[in-house]
């Protein structure tokens, strides 16, 4: 079997696949600093004569799958295979594998880092220092930038999957209390309180959005829910932008209805005018979709994908 890999994939992972499956053709999208579009992917699949594909961000459209209906599998090195026409693959009998939780540790660590940075007013304090404003007495900065500790805060999770659970484990010893809304999961840890979504928004000091994109979650976080938040509460979204009605969030930030927001995802990337209004708010800590951007994440997705593919290969051999 010939496997075309366009996702970043370390040498050990590629060797393991070659040993188990046959040949690996490696054409990471990083070569051109952007994902392959559908036409480019069609060319790569044709030139490589691949029997299977492992991708990350590339456009695996209906056209691509229809052109190569005999692919043995499609691997997607992402938390959800949102760049793949999964329904078309299913109709063709092509299994689609993905790598949930590959970036859970990375996102959880950045969540903790940026929540503390925001609560301690670290960034404005650094700018104040660099601008030479420390000239009004020794205690000026101590008074102006006094912040809050993370310890003792209640963190409300909207969605309690791999990222939410990893955050919960990291903050256990601060300590923080956890309340979560997730209709599909109930934690065995009785220290974590399951609740309705309204309760999460009304009781939490920090509301963390950890939702995938589905028809049910698009626009789920709206003015009605945001209005339930405490005035000193902080809104955090490191999942997907489309689950939040951004105009409702912007209104809450502009009116100072809530303390602020920590945002890593936007409706338009690069940002459009409304996104930029959110980004440039003084009560917003915004980052350019980098919460999952660590070198270790690539190793994680290789390990997860290889494990799934080895189990799949064994099951195929058993059936045959």
Image (cartoon, rainbow, N blue to C red):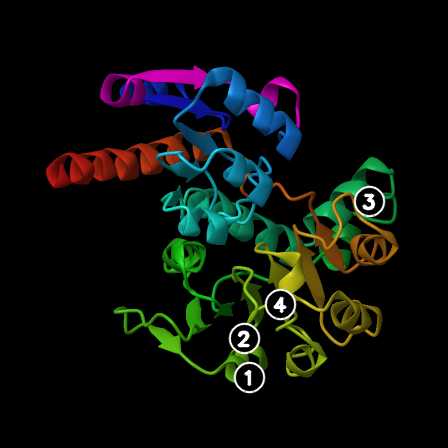
Q: Earlier in the sequence, mark 2 or mark 4?
A: 2
Start and end of the magenta stretch?
Answer: 17-34
Does the stretch in magenta take in 20?
Answer: yes
- Residue 128 is marked as 3
**In the image: residue 170, left or right of residue 199:** left
Q: Which residue is mark 1?
A: 198
**Label 1 environment density (alpha carbons within 10 Å; few <14, some 14–19, many ≥20):** some
Disc number lying in front (3 or 1): 1
- Residue 218 is marked as 4
Query: Which residue is at a point 69% across and 62% down the rendered structure image?
Result: 261
Q: Residue 198: x, y in percent? A: 55, 84
Q: Earlier in the sequence, mark 2 or mark 1?
A: 1
Does the stretch in magenta take in 27?
Answer: yes
**Marks 4 and 1, how far apart at CA:** 17 Å
- Circles 4 and 1: CB atoms closer than 8 Å: no
Q: Secondary structure at mark 4?
A: loop
- Residue 204 is marked as 2
């Amino acid at each position: 079997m010939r496997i075309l890999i366009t996702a970043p994939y370390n040498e050990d992972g590629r060797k393991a696949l070659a040993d188990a499956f046959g040949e690996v053709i490696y054409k990471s999208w990083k070569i051109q600093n952007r994902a392959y579009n559908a036409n480019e992917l069609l060319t790569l699949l044709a030139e490589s004569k691949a029997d299977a594909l492992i991708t990350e961000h590339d456009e695996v459209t209906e056209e691509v799958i229809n052109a190569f209906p005999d692919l043995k599998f499609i691997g997607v090195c992402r938390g959800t295979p949102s760049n793949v026409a999964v329904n078309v693959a299913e109709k063709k009998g092509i299994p689609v594998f993905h790598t949930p939780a590959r970036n859970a540790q990375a996102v959880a660590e950045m969540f903790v880092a940026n929540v503390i940075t925001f609560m301690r007013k670290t960034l404005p304090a650094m700018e104040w220092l660099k601008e030479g404003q420390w000239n009004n007495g020794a205690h000026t900065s101590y008074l102006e930038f006094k912040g809050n500790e993370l310890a003792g805060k209640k963190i409300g999770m909207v969605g309690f999957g791999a990222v939410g659970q990893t955050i919960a484990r990291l903050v256990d010893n601060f300590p923080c209390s956890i309340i979560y809304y997730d209709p599909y999961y109930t934690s065995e840890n009785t220290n974590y309180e399951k609740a309705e979504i309204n309760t999460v928004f009304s009781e939490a000091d920090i509301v963390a959005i950890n939702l995938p994109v589905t028809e049910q979650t698009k626009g789920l976080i709206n003015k009605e829910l945001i209005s339930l938040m405490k005035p000193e509460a902080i809104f955090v979204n490191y999942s997907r932008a489309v689950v939040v009605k951004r105009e409702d969030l912007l209104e809450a930030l502009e009116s100072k209805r809530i303390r602020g927001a920590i945002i890593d995802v936007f409706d338009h990337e690069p940002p459009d005018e409304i996104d930029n209004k959110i980004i440039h708010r003084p009560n917003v800590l915004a980052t350019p979709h980098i919460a999952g951007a660590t070198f270790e994440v690539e190793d994680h997705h290789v390990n997860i994908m290889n494990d799934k593919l080895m189990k799949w290969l064994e099951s195929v051999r058993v059936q045959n």
